[in-house]
Image (spheres, rainbow, N blue to C red):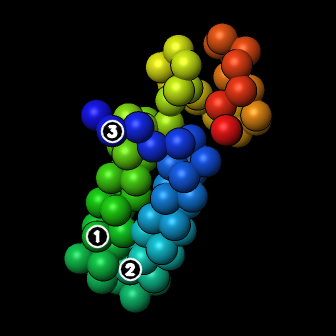
Amino acid sequence: MRYIPPKKVRVIFLIALLPALLLTVIGGNIQSKPVMFTGIGIALLALIFYRIWYRCPHCGRFLDRSWGEYCPHCGKRVNQ
């Protein structure tokens, strides 16, 4: 697997998640199941991407909800 820096993973995740949530809400308001399920599908794909790629470059463990400068597991700096 090719390495993607955690900062870029967060940006990609947010760029994918925000329109997905918007599609879900719009689909619910106009009562369109295809639009709503498309938004839910995109959100799930964004969450899977985040879970697979948001890892410490040093120890390889999932960074969870830590958006800080240091890995909560090994203590090394993650954003270089």
**Does residue 15 appear in the picture of this structure?**
yes
Residue 54 versus residue 77 in the image, above or below: below
Label 3 close to label 1 by CB (< 8 Å): no
Q: Quadrant of the N terminus?
A: top left
Q: Mark 3 against mark 1, which lies toward the viewer?
A: 3
Tell me the CA gap for discs 1 and 2: 9 Å
Label 3 to label 1: alpha-carbon separation: 28 Å
Residue 29 circle label: none
Location of residue 11 by image quarter: bottom right
Lower position in the chain sequence, tag 3 or tag 1: 3
Task: Give the spatial CA distance, label 3 vs label 2.
Answer: 35 Å
Residue matched to label 3: 2
Query: Circle 1 is placed at which residue position?
Result: 38
Residue type marked 2: Gly
The outermost residue toward the right is: 69
Q: Is residue 21 visible?
A: no
Q: Give whichever of 52, 17 is nearer the camera.
A: 52
Which dot, 1 or 2, sits closer to the camera? 1
Q: Which residue is mark 2?
A: 27
Name the residue rendered at 45%, 82% in the picture.
Answer: 26
Q: Residue at x 33, y 52 (%)?
A: 45
Of residues 42 and 40, the one nearer the viewer is 42
Q: Residue at x 55, y 19 (%)?
A: 58
Answer with left or right where residue 54 lies relative to residue 3. right
Residue 52: give x, y in percent of width and height. 38, 35
Q: Nearer the viewer, residue 29 or 66?
A: 66
Left or right relative to 15: residue 36:
left
Residue 76 image point, x, y percent: 70, 19
